[in-house]
Amino acid sequence: MRAGIAERIGSVEVLAALLVLLIVLREQVAGLLSAPALATWTTVFVSVMVQAVPFLVFGVTLSAVIAVYVPPSFWARALPRHPALAVPVASAAGVVLPGCECGAVPIAGSLIRRGVTPAAALAFLLAAPAVNPIVLTATAVAFPGNPEMVLGRAVAGLAVAVVMGWLWLRLGRADWLRLPHRPDLDGLRRGQAFWSAVRHDLVHAGGFLVVGAMAAAGINVLVPERWLQTLADQPVLSVLALAALAVLLSICSEADAFVAASLSQFSLTSRLAFLVVGPMVDLKLISMQAGIFGRRFAVRFAPATFAVAVVFAVIVGMVLL
């Protein structure tokens, strides 16, 4: 009897119970949220989730379409057979697909499942949220007096994606990638297989997104603003500071240009580092990558991407800005 009841209790039932509990205790919850620090934490957490969830849903939906409706033979025809050539082609494909980093992670996982070489899938993962048309348009609007920021972001973002793909070909190991087991889709009708894939990826990636958003909100509360002013006058430290800030703030790539534009005390090169690093390495992304590809992958890929992104942001900034 108890086993039967336990089997009927799933995530939907737990969520419903939590919502009822919040309604019953709404006055006590409102009192807790009145504290300034907690109110700031809640605001940041909600803003990150509101920005990210639509793109996460888009990403897992497209991932399910790839898994169910696109035959594996398509990727053999669409990408060059040589992995080194497939990397820049996949990076270029990321340019034309509007999307956020939250959606790109499950899409890259689905591409690997469908037989795409991991180096090409990872290059797509980095390029799609960094240099797609929506992001570049937002950057142009945020920096109306500095059109070179748009070109700098595009060049640096593409360079990082291609170089990281090639680095994976050279140094990456297959046992670092551990994609979570998906429910077996074979034998199901296409509609059933599609929704099964969507539910699995949304629950799996969504949980890590929540963890990353909570960490980002905590950092926003704990890091004093005066530290930024102190670092702005030091060229080397200012680049590293804004690159680290991009990781900690975890702002969606469609909105980060406006935050960078507001940091007027920093140089354009420092702000370019903020724009290049953010869509490729941030707390929610690291958390999601650990969930989709495994922790062994995340602890290697994220620091390497951060270092390469900072180097190319500085090089492009010195040439163009």
Image (cartoon, rainbow, N blue to C red):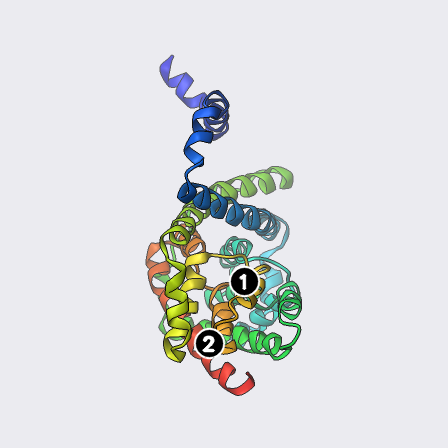
Report whether residue 83 is seen.
no
Q: Percent position (x, y) of residue 301?
A: 38, 65
Residue placed most toward the observer, 209 or 33: 33
Residue 54 drawn above or below residue 14: below
Q: Which residue is located at x 42 percent, y 55 percent?
A: 289
The residue under label 2 is 163
Q: Position of residue 278 (x, y in %)?
A: 48, 64
Residue designated by label 1: 259
Q: Nearer the viewer, residue 225 or 187?
A: 225
Which quadrant holds residue 90? bottom right
**Residue at point 42%, 63% (across, down):** 245
Measure how far apart labels 1 and 2 are at the Cα level.
Answer: 27 Å
Q: Residues within 10 Å of mark 1 (few under 14, many from 20)?
A: some
Residue 92 is at least partly visible in this image:
yes
* Quadrant placement of the N terminus: top left
Q: Examine the rendered structure and indicate whether residue 62 appears above or below residue 200.
A: below
